[in-house]
C-alpha cells in the first residue's frame, strides 16, 4: 500500500520584525497573522538574499531586530499570484491580498522557521 504523495511545494521567505514574529509563534509557527489596516498586501519573497537584505537593513533599523523566516507553500495554489518584480532582477515578491491570507495560510505545508536573525 502506498501513501499519497505530498503536493509539490515552493519555498518562500519573509523578512519580519519581532512583533510579527511573536504573532507567528502564537500561531504555532503554522500561519501568518492578519494584516493591519495599513497593510493591504502580504508579501513573501522568492529568494533568501532579498529577505536577508530587508531584515538586516530595514527591520533592524525600524524594530531593533530583523528575522528571516522560511516556509513551504503548495505550488499549485501559489500559481494564482504572479511574481512581482519590486526592483532588480532578484527582487521578487508575491503579493497576497490581505483578505486572502487565511486561504494562503491553509496552503502552508509544515511550519514557518526562523533561518536568520539580525540585531
Image (spheres, grey):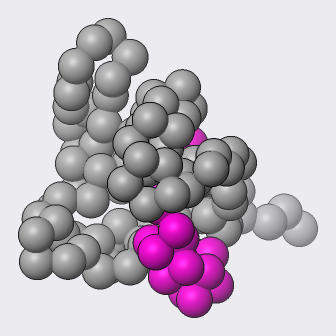
Instruction: Confirm whether the magenta stretch covers residue 4.
Output: no
Q: Residue at x 16, y 66 (%)?
A: 39
Q: Quadrant of residue 105?
A: bottom left
From this viewpoint, is residue 79 visible?
no
* 52 vs 98: above or below: above
Quick check: 112 left or right of 15? right
Residue 61 spot, x, y in % from top left: 41, 47
In this picture, residue 46 sits left or right of residue 29: left
Is 73 left or right of 91, judged from the image as shown? right
Q: Position of residue 2 (x, y in %)?
A: 84, 63
Give the x, y percent position of residue 115.
71, 48
Q: Furthest residue to the top?
A: 89
The residue at the point 63 percent across, 46 percent down is 118
> Residue at horizontal 55%, vertical 56%?
65
Q: Residue at x 52, y 68 (%)?
A: 18
| Residue interval drawn in magenta | 9-29
Residue 20 in view (yes/no): yes
Q: Is residue 97 left or right of residue 59?
A: left
Magenta stretch encompasses residue 18: yes
Q: Residue furthest right?
A: 1
Asked whether 19 or 60 is in front, the reply is 60
Residue 35 screen position, x and y as percent: 24, 75
Amino acid at each position: 500500500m502506498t501513501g499519497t504523495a505530498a503536493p509539490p511545494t515552493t519555498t518562500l521567505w519573509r523578512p519580519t520584525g519581532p512583533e510579527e514574529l511573536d504573532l507567528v509563534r502564537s500561531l504555532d509557527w503554522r500561519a501568518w497573522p492578519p494584516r493591519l489596516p495599513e497593510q493591504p498586501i502580504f508579501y513573501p519573497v522568492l529568494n533568501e538574499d532579498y529577505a536577508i537584505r530587508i531584515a538586516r537593513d530595514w527591520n533592524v533599523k525600524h524594530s531593533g531586530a530583523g528575522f528571516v523566516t522560511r516556509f513551504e507553500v503548495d505550488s499549485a495554489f501559489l500559481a494564482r499570484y504572479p511574481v512581482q518584480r519590486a526592483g532588480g532582477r532578484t527582487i521578487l515578491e508575491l503579493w497576497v491580498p490581505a483578505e486572502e491570507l487565511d486561504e494562503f495560510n491553509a496552503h502552508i505545508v509544515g511550519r514557518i522557521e526562523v533561518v536568520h536573525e539580525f540585531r
